[in-house]
Structures are given as C-alpha cells and as structure tokens.
Image (tube, rainbow, N blue to C red):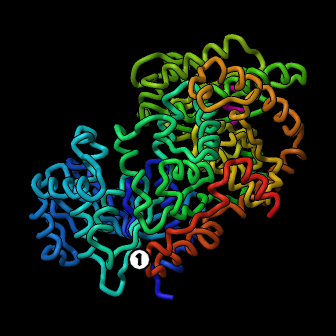
Amino acid sequence: MKKLTAAHVTHEAAEKIGGIGTVLEGILTSPVYQEHFERSILVGPFAEHVQVNPAERLGSDSTVLYSSIDGIDELDLKGRLQPIEWAFDVKIIYGKRQFFVHGDEDRTGEAEILLIDVFRINQDRLNQFKLRLWETLGIDSSRYDAAWDYEEYVRLAVPAYHALLVLLKRDQLPCLLFSHEFMGLPAAFKAILDGEAQFRTVFHAHECATARRLVENHPGHDTRFYNILHQAREQGRYVDDVFGDQSDAFRHALISRAHLCDGVIAVGDHTAEEMHFLGPCFDHHQIDLVYNGVPAMEVTTEEKDASRSMLVDYSNTLMGYVPDVLMTHVTRPVISKGMWRDIRVCHELDRHFEKRGLKGVLYLLTTGGGTRRPQDVRSMEAEYGWPCQHREGYPDLVGPEIELNRMVEAFNADHEHIQAVLVNQFGWSRRRIGVRLPPLMDFADFRFATDIEFGMATYEPFGISPLEPLASGALCIISTVCGCEGFVEYVTRGEGIDNVIVTDFTRLDGPRTIEQLTHMGQAERDRIEHRVCAEVAEEIMRRLPTDAAGRDALLQSGQAIVHKLGWDQVLENKMIPMLQRVMAAEDTDENNNHCDERIRLPRRGRKHAAKSA
C-alpha cells in the first residue's frame, strides 16, 4: 500500500509545550508510524518575531530551509511561496525538525515544519473566509474576534492550505490533515470546502473543550458533570438541552462541527462520549477510540534504588527526616488536575502512617510562572529555604501557585507524618532546583524514585503523566474520568493491575435526577470526596510495599504492563487501521454512517460489555 502523507495542525509545531507535543513526539518517533508515512508536516502560527538567531525560528534540533523574514531559500521555494505571502500579507518559515524520545536514542524521527506569521493579514481575504464560515457552517466569527486563540487559527487556515499544496507532490495526495484540537479546525474546514481531492481531514480530540469548561467552571466538577452526562445520554438529550446554549464559547462553536471531518479520534472513552454529547450529528459519525501511548522506559532495580536514594537524601536535607514513602504529582496548576485531592488523601494517610511508624513526603511539581532562572532559584534557596518556604511575588509564587501554597502550608501545620513540598518550577536538576539537590540527579531520577504518583483529575481526557512512573514500579493513583484508566482496563482485559489504583469521585451516595445534579454544590461534592479519599488511603496501605522485595515486585509488574501501553501498539492496532479506512473510503457518508457502540454506551454498559467480550 502507498505510504501516507500527513499535515498536523497544532500550536506545538516548533516546540513541545504540553500534551499534544508529547503525543506528536511519540507518534513521529514510532517505527510503526514511519513504516506507513512518507512525509509529515507540522503546521502552526509563528510567534517568535524578534528571535535574533534565524536558525532558531523553528525551535530546537531544527533546520530552516525557507524564511522570507531572513531571506533564506535553500530549496528555491520563493517563486511558489512568495505569491501566497503577497496575497495574504503573511510571512512563511519552513524547514525540518528532529525528534528524540528522552532516554531512548534509538527512537528518533523527523518532520517538516511550516510556520506562518499571521500577525499582519490581508483583512479583505480574511473576511471572505469568515463569511464562508458563516454562510456554510453557521460560525459567527464576529462573536469571537477578540479571542486571539480563535482569530490566530482562522487567519492561519487559508494561507496554510495553499502553502501545503505548494509543498506536497501530486502523487502524495490526498494528504491526511490532522486538526489537533480546535486549533486546526479552521484549516480543516477550508480543506473540506475546497480540497476534497487533495485532503482527508481528521479531528484529533485530545479533549472535548465544552466538557472541560463545564467541569472546571462549576464547584460540582466531575461528580456533577459525568452523572448528568450519563443520564442525559440514556435519555437522548444533548449538552445544550441540559446546560443551555454553549455557542458563546468559540471552542464549542468549532468542535461541535468536527463531525464534518472524514474521521474523528478520541483519546479516551469519556472524550468519545463527550463528543457524542455535543449534538445529534455525532450520533451518525464513527468516533474512533485511539488511546495515547505511554513511555515504556527500561528501569532496573538498581536504577530505581539509586534514584530513590537521591530523593530520600534530598528530602532529609530539606525537612530533617528520612521519608519511608515518596509521593509525587507532576502536573499543571489547573483546577482539572484536582490537586486538593492529593492533600485530602494524604490527610487520611497521615494517621495510617502514624500507626505503622512511617514518614512520608509529597512533592507537588508544578509551575504557573514558567521556568525560574538558576540565579533566582539559588537566591530563594539561600534567603528563605525555597522550596520548603515560599513568598508571594515573582520569582516565587504567582497566579494559581499562591492558593496551592496556602493549601500546602495549612496541611503541613496540622500533620506530622507527611509533609508536602510545593516545587513551583519546571525541570529537576541543580540548575533548576538548587544546590541542595544531589549533583547527579535529574528529572528521570525524580520519576524513577517515586513510590506513589497522584493523578486524581476532575477532567483528564487521557493522562500520560500519571502513568509515567509505572515503568519504575510506582503506585499510580488515577480517577475514573482519566482516559488512561480505560487504556489500562483495555490492555488488562478488565482485570486491572496492582500498580494502578482507580478512584471514583462520581459515585453518588444515592440516586439524583438531572435537575438535582444540576444544582449540586461544593458541600455535597466535598462529602463524596472525603469518603472516597479515605477509601483510597486504605487501598494505598494495602498495596504499599513494606520492603525492597515488595518494591521490586511492583517494578516487575510495571515493566510488564508498560510494554503493552506504548505508541507502537496504539498505532498498529488503533490509529493506522482507522486512517487506512478513512483514506480508502470513497464516500464520506459510508465512512460516517455507523457508530462505535462500545463508545456510545454509558460507563456501566461499557464495563459490562468489556467483561462479556
């Protein structure tokens, strides 16, 4: 079969910033992907306008082949790209970028990068495209013009479409155009309207933005939302029927029309169900469940012990005691990560530790203020004992870090056997964390060392990070709303694994109608959370190893499972067959007029179906 060509529209085309960048890195470095794809072009807007070094315009490990900003034209592309720049008043930067998997030099990849500077744009041509979006798709851009996240990607769409046609050879068409989240949908809509012969479009739902908004912006969070979702699906009701008109949010306006794409990928069971919840159009569209891959690092007992010893020594230096249990949570400081649940579980664990004579430490590694400079870290460390002590104001606490620190301080004041440390920094090395850190310790050691990784999110479409320490034998604590929970259930055939503890914060004390659930407040959710956190603490104590042999057993079981969760398996069994189906379909109606019934079932039905299969 002819090799495929892909264009991935994303905000992480030039640099890995978060989850989508991690996904692209995993895909592009997989031998399975490389076997099936001849070319991959990452497309995004250009932001580094004042970058001094032209060689760095496409990010690290890249080569610039064309840049109208810098007068670079290594491939004689000016004659074909410059008319696009003139027509739309944009600048184009094009080149190649290398990809490497951390700790695995054998897994490398390469992609072309196409960035377009859209800060200046031909307003008349842009308005023509916005008019088409209104006339054909009912998207009223005038409601969202003030939102740069919307405006930027609408501006990107048409010049990116024409630039791709310049770069692609005739025998490489049709090209699979991936819209990674809402950002790529304007370009996908352009391809749908004008490029039927040249493109096949795929919406890659790394989340459902409408669902995230409803979960994060109400004190009932996941407890409220998912109980409403499951009841509404059973009753044939959709998001606007229950929660009212959502069209004020541009992300909803875009993703609610993603059914127009030739294919839709959801990274988790809940995300697929949330996409169906957007409207009846999705009920007649197949949504393919394609989980994210989890890094399958090789970790030996000796490596685990060495990393653990370093974190124990650092903890002793910070707090004056040797912890028996090392707990971590690596995440972003947003409501959806549910970090207060870590504290509530630790509150319950503290009394268990007292009975067993144990000591523990919880490291919350997160930053709302970006990467602090090494000189600032050294100053804070020397002046007032950062990261055990904090002060409000940059270079220390900013934004959501302030409230997190108050929560940590309150916990530490009332507990003796567990102490929490907020490390509001990105990275893990002496340069980033300070001179008290063991000299040779790095971020991999931090991940290898942990005994418990928390990830009890209120909204988590997949969640690669909470499962990363699986490879080193950690207990990974996730919630039922995490997409990775479905992946673990899938690969273990519903049996689960000792390394993963699944928490259910959506389990109600009794039946509730949709109307009752709509008015759920924080008090009711708190009652449920306290009950669940107590149960989680008891389960942790049952599974927590008490000696080196127990830790080694969890390491071996973790190593066994991660090799079933990798990108190669996901691509081979899920994504590639789906993409080949999309490419082979002569009629998009034929492709879309059937549904994955397993995905559409409420959670109770999916559990039953999985056990019966």
Residue 365: image location, x then y, percent: 57, 34
Indicate left or right for 118 with 239 as reference: left
Residue position marked by numbered label 1 in the rendering = 5
Q: Is residue 515 visible?
A: yes
Name which residue type carries label 1. Answer: Thr
Quadrant of the rendered structure where residue 93 is? bottom left
Q: Residue 316 colored magenta?
A: yes
Residue 100 painted magenta: no
Q: Main secondary structure of the magenta part?
A: helix
Q: Is residue 321 left or right of residue 4?
A: right
**Residue at 15% from the left image edge and 53% from the top image edge:** 127
Q: Is residue 581 above or below residue 233?
A: below
258 or 307, nearer to the observer: 258
In the visual, does 126 lie left or right of 279? left
Residue at screen point 15% across, 67% down:
84
Q: What is the magenta range?
A: 310-318
Query: Does residue 64 appear anywhere in the picture?
Result: no
